[in-house]
Image (cartoon, coloured by chain):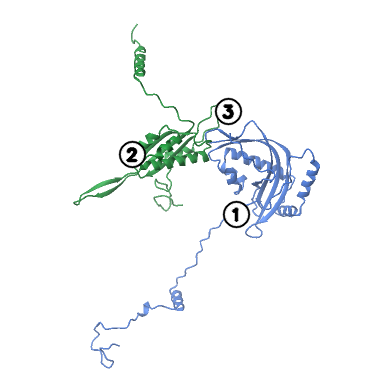
């Protein structure tokens, strides 16, 4: 014990004299080994379940066009000369294996799909989407256009007035390219269909002060477009929506003439 | 998300001190005019810009704002560059920002084709602090801030009004005398 009290002397009284004691920790404050800690926790009865705060997100559309369709050169320019040749080429392209496979997969999920009726519906969706863009009806535009296409269509347009109208369709629209792909998990299928449209449209964009920026109201222009439509196949309530446009390399968008 | 000064658990009311409190001047940039018919004269573009809470006095800033009013933007920038006041640097930055905004967002063709239609100063938030004097005396000093507002309009600056001469005043006086009529008479 201590130097001042030899071991043989009996303690006279329990007076708390300040003696030099070696540092000792009381029993209840001692560090426990992990097993003893577990025992104590279990005996007290509190159980803390592990809470993972997970945020689920829902992918309603793919980020990009899968396998973009490469339109043949001079598509709308040489129709008068070699019409038959182009038509044959188109049909051959349609019959490529990948397109056929994808088509079959889409028909599995959606039996009503057919390459004959779909282009008309697609054109209707296209016209309606552009009309809603001109009037700027956000809710309906979101239902007709995927989330990837929406910012592309709408960027920079908030303070501008757009006037768009559809005059006529010069050639009947045609399905040109079909692809089916799954992202993140296998079986999470999205189908993408490219439709070729040759139409006549009127576009006029006015800036914030009502001055004409691009286009003109009296000048209809002939437009050849390859529009990609997408649908989330696994979702039974999914609809075909506009996903984007394919710009061919031989016809890049020209710099618009600012008036 | 909770970006309001008053943090109620259920309601998230935006009071006047969130990150970006849009005053009336900033909202003036958002009005959209309907498209003009082809026969009408082209409407000149108007760009509103402002800077808030500049550490400068509003009275001292007023002199610079009055200097600039009515000048073309190039002339204004030149004058501010060689002015010795502290506010001149700030106003120059504001004008350059507004010019860039005009060209990029508001479809203005030439960046020198702008003139300053209005330029005003306003009082910012003042803060009171203690200014320590000798012998334990103190004064309350105000830390003074101001806002600066500018409106750029496209087009050459309007010609300055000719000053009123005595001849004009005399003409008006004679006109008043001539336009008198007799009332309540036959």
Whether residue B134 sits left or right of residue B93 in the image: it is left
Q: Residue at 47% across / 36% down in the picture? A: B47
Q: Using the numbered discs, state the Cα–Cα distance from disc 2 to disc 1 in whole angstroms.
A: 57 Å
**What residue sits right under mark 1 in the picture?**
A59
| Colour of chain A in the rendered structure image | blue
Q: Quadrant of the C terminus of chain A?
A: top right
Q: Residue at 27% across / 93% down in the picture? A: A8
Q: Is A81 located above or below residue A22 in the figure?
A: above
Give the class, few, some or many, for how many residues have Cα within 10 Å of label 3's Cα (few <14, many ≥20).
few
Q: Using the numbered discs, state the Cα–Cα distance from disc 2 to disc 3 in whole angstroms.
A: 46 Å
Q: Is A87 located above or below residue B45 in the figure?
A: below
Q: Earlier in the sequence, mark 2 or mark 3?
A: 3
**What residue sits right under mark 2 in the picture?**
B60
x and y percentages locating residue B174 in the rendered image = 35, 14
* Residue A67 in sight here: yes
x and y percentages locating residue A188 in the rendered image = 65, 57
Q: Viewer-proximal residue, B96 or A182?
A: B96
Per the image, label 1 sits on a secondary structure element best described as: loop
Whether residue B152 sits left or right of residue A205 in the image: it is left
Q: Is A103 located above or below residue B83 in the figure?
A: below
Q: Which mark is residue B38?
A: 3
Q: Quadrant of the N terminus of chain A?
A: bottom left
Q: Viewer-proximal residue, A54 or A223?
A: A223
Per the image, label 2 sits on a secondary structure element best described as: helix
Looking at this view, name the residue that lies furthest to the top. B186
Q: Which chain is green in the rendering? A: B
Q: Chain of mark 1?
A: A
């Amino acid at each position: 014990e201590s130097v001042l009290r030899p071991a043989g002397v009996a303690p006279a009284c329990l007076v708390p004299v300040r003696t030099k004691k070696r540092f000792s920790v009381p029993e209840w404050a001692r560090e426990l080994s992990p097993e003893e800690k577990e025992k104590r926790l279990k005996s007290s009865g509190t159980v803390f379940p592990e809470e993972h705060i997970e945020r689920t997100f829902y992918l309603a559309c793919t980020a990009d066009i899968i396998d973009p369709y490469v339109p043949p050169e001079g598509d709308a320019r040489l129709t008068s000369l070699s019409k038959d040749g182009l038509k044959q080429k188109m049909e051959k392209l349609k019959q490529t294996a990948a397109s056929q496979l994808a088509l079959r997969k889409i028909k599995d999920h959606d039996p009503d799909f057919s390459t004959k009726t779909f282009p008309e519906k697609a054109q209707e969706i296209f016209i309606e989407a552009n009309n809603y863009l001109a009037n700027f009806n956000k809710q309906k535009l979101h239902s007709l256009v995927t989330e990837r296409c929406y910012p592309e269509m709408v960027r920079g347009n908030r303070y501008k007035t757009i006037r768009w109208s559809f005059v006529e369709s010069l050639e009947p629209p045609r399905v040109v390219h079909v692809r089916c792909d799954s992202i993140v998990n296998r079986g999470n299928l999205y189908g993408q269909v490219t439709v070729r449209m040759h139409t006549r449209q009127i576009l006029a964009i006015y800036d914030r002060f009502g001055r004409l920026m691009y286009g003109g109201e009296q000048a209809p222009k002939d437009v050849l477009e390859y529009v990609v439509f997408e649908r989330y196949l696994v979702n039974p309530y999914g609809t075909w929506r506009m996903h984007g446009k394919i710009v061919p390399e031989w016809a890049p968008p020209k710099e618009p003439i600012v008036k | 998300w909770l970006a309001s000064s008053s943090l109620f658990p259920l309601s998230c009311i935006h009071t006047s001190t969130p990150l970006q409190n849009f005053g009336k001047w900033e909202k003036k940039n958002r009005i959209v005019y309907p498209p003009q018919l082809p026969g009408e004269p082209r409407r000149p573009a108007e760009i509103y810009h402002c800077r808030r809470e500049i550490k400068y006095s509003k009275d001292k800033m007023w002199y610079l704002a009055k200097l600039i009013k009515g000048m073309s933007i190039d002339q204004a920038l030149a004058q501010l560059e060689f002015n010795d006041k502290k506010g001149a640097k700030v106003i120059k930055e504001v004008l350059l920002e507004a010019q860039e905004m005009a060209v990029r967002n508001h479809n203005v063709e030439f960046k020198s084709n702008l003139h300053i239609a209005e330029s005003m100063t306003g009082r910012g938030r003042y803060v009171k602090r203690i200014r320590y004097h000798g012998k334990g005396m103190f004064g309350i000093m105000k830390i003074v801030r101001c806002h600066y507002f500018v409106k750029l309009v496209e087009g050459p600056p309007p010609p300055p009004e000719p000053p009123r001469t005595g001849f004009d005043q005399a003409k008006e006086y004679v006109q008043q005398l001539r336009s008198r009529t007799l009332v309540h008479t036959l």
